[in-house]
Amino acid sequence: MRLRQTTIGRSIFRSPDRRTERDQAAGHWSNFWLHIYPVKVRRRELHFGYSWYLGVASTVLFGSLVVSGVYLMFFYVPSPGSAYGDIQTLQTQVAFGQFIRNVHRWSAHLMVIAVAAHMARVFYRGAYKAPREFNWVIGVMLLVLTLLLSFTGYLLPWDQLAYWAVTVGTSMANFVPVIGDEVRDVLLGGDQVGAATLLRFYVLHVALLPLVLVGMLMVHLWRWRKDAMLDQGGEGGER
Amino acid sequence: MSESDPRLTQGKRLLGVVPGQPPGGERKVPQEQDLVMVSPHLLVRHAVVALAVLLLVLIVSILFDAPLREVANPFETPNPEKAPWYFAALQELLAHFHPMVAGVLVPAAIIGGLVALPYVDRSAAVGLGLRKVAVVAFTMFLLVWIVLTLIGFAFRGPNWSWVWPWDEWHGEL
């Protein structure tokens, strides 16, 4: 509070002193970092039982994955000749390498659980109902993206676990009617998991899928902010 | 009456001209549907949740190392051959149905069904008791899926035969 009232503080924040709620709202409105938040929400949204805060948890886990993932990228080359050795080096020679890899692995599993649980909680809350239908659809897409991100990342250590899990997972593509073989070829870059697959999965994992996910997440949060004023009744009530 | 007279200040507070609570206290009982300021009320809660989640990740990452098996070998198929745990339910279905059903139709139906849900279920009711069909159907799906995932993850061994996880462990994370 003090900082904001100094000459320098005023020049940075350019928000009025926090005095009345109206001033507070104006301050919130003019804050860059808070632009993803609505200014006000319904009181019931503060309670743990309303959402179990699973959306926030998912977002935080995604942040943890981005940070740890960027660190891992410094030490990893996506080719069958070096990938496995890079992971071994990472775990034994790199400062905090094993720990950061653990963070990435466990955050990924937790994010799948958090996103799925978020969806279930939204269902039981009835929060997918009109006029929020489309944000539910975006949420389903975010769940699919989360699974794809997790699955593409699963291959990268290039160990037996990774190789065969992805072989099983992608074998189903063969059974897509009519274009089965083509789907498999696009996915794997060949008829079995190999060097081309590793490169494809890597690019999908570190560039394409995260970008798409962030884009969708922005729409998801924007829609949530716009709908914050809606009053969809409590448990047992009508909208 | 001077400007600093307390009665004058109280009066101004009542009118909302100066900040502070009116002498009568809160004018109404807070309701669930009332609007509250996100900053700080929601922000502090989100900060606490973020710290709790990061603490959980920190503890798990200190206690358990991410698995790393031998280097990939296309000529040596492990037995059992397991998909990641979140696809374990699909893999379990694959043992009972044609791959066209388990690998293509079921996932497509699940995603399609989830996307269609808010457009099919048009009632305005949000209470659990007021939408029994949707709640029962979704809960059944969820339970079946969790059970299939558990079976595929922990109860399947070599050649996808049934094993008890406390006898032999084949789950992989």
Image (tube, coloured by chain):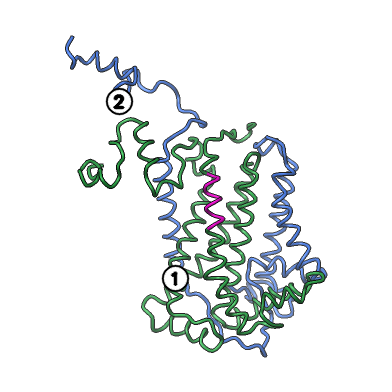
Magenta span of residues: A215-224
- Residue drawn at x 52%, y 70% as measured from the top left: A206
* Count of marks placed on residues: 2
- Residue drawn at x 67%, y 64% as measured from the top left: B149
Task: Determine if the magenta segment contains residue B93.
Answer: no
| Label disc, if present, on residue B135 of the rendered structure | none
Which residue occupies the foreground of this view, A45 or B168?
A45
User: In the rendered image of this protein, does residue A77 appear above or below residue A229?
Assistant: below
Please provide percent x and percent y for residue B77: 68, 86
> Are both tags, 2 and 1, on one chain?
no
Q: Residues within 10 Å of mark 2 (few under 14, many from 20)?
A: some
Mark 1 belongs to which amino acid? Val
Please provide percent x and percent y for residue A90: 43, 81
Q: Chain of mark 2?
A: B
Instruction: Provide the residue designation for mark 2.
Output: B20
Of the 4 image quadrants, the one containing the C terminus of chain A is top right
| Label disc, if present, on residue A70 of the rendered structure | 1
Residue B57 relative to residue B151: left or right: left
Mark 2 belongs to which amino acid? Gly
Residue B149 relative to residue A52: left or right: right
Which residue occupies the foreground of this view, B65 or A88?
A88
Please provide percent x and percent y for residue A56: 49, 52
Q: Secondary structure at mark 2?
A: loop
Q: Chain of mark 1?
A: A
Q: Secondary structure at mark 1?
A: helix
Comparing marks 2 and 1, which lies closer to the viewer? 1
Which residue occupies the foreground of this view, A148 or A110?
A148
| Chain in green colour | A
Task: Determine if the magenta segment contains residue A222.
Answer: yes
User: In the rendered image of this protein, does residue A98 appear above or below residue A63?
Assistant: below
Please provide percent x and percent y for residue A164: 65, 80
